Image: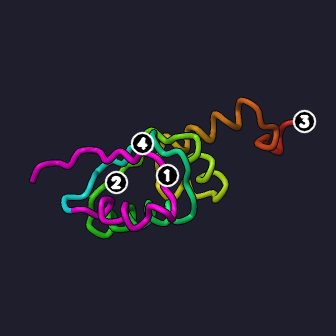
Amino acid sequence: MKKPAALRIEGELTIFRAMELKPVLLANPPPSEIDLSGVTEMDSAGVQLLMLAKKTALTEGRSLRLMAHSPPVIEVFELLNIAGYFDDPLVMDSRASGRASGSTKARSSNES
């Protein structure tokens, strides 16, 4: 079976596009990567779609990687604290660099 190409999502990943995007995310063959660089807005319906795609991939014993996260995607992932669910290094790296560059909330208890 030919490896499916990365799926690139453009525009909104919101409730207004949920019915359109669900069959694309769960297509056969399913994408092994989802490029989120073109996402301009994301809501909880978009999060649910990505979580469904990830859960389906895990159930089927295949990998699914999210890549090239746009700022709106990172913002929602951080707000909902769900980056770990996707186990995606791009999201995890972005969160760590954001904390290092400007936030004082991430200090350890050993710092004075």
Amino acid type for the residue under numbered disc 2: Leu
Q: Which residue is mark 3?
A: 112
Marks 3/1: CA–CA distance: 43 Å
Q: Secondary structure at mark 4?
A: strand
- Residue 96, located in which quarter of the rendered image? top right
Residue 12's x, y, as percent?
49, 52
Judge whether 47 appears above or below 110 on screen.
below
Q: Residue 26's spot in the image, x, y percent?
A: 29, 64
Q: Earlier in the sequence, mark 3 or mark 4?
A: 4
Task: Give me the disc on residue 64.
Answer: 2
Badge 1 marks a residue whose secondary structure is strand
How far across and how far down the image is residue 70, in percent? 52, 40
Query: Between disc 3 and disc 1, whose residue precedes?
Result: 1
Image coordinates of residue 88 in percent, x first then y, are: 46, 47
Highlighted range, magenta: 1-27
Q: Residues within 10 Å of mark 4 (few under 14, many from 20)?
A: some
User: Which callout, 3 or 2, points at the residue further toward the start of the chain?
Assistant: 2
Circle 3 sits in a helix, a strand or a loop, which is it? loop
Q: CA distance from mark 4 to mark 1?
A: 16 Å
Q: Which mark is residue 12?
A: 1
Q: Amino acid at mark 1?
A: Glu
Q: Amino acid at mark 4?
A: Met
Circle 3 or circle 4, nearest the eye: 4
Q: Give the mark toward the camera: 3 or 1.
A: 1
Please report the residue visible at 31 percent of the width from the left and 70 percent of the height from the top.
59
Q: Which residue is mark 4?
A: 67
Relative depth, front residue between 39 and 26: 39
23 in magenta: yes
The quadrant of the picture occupied by the N terminus is bottom left
Between the C-alphas of marks 4 and 2, the distance is: 10 Å
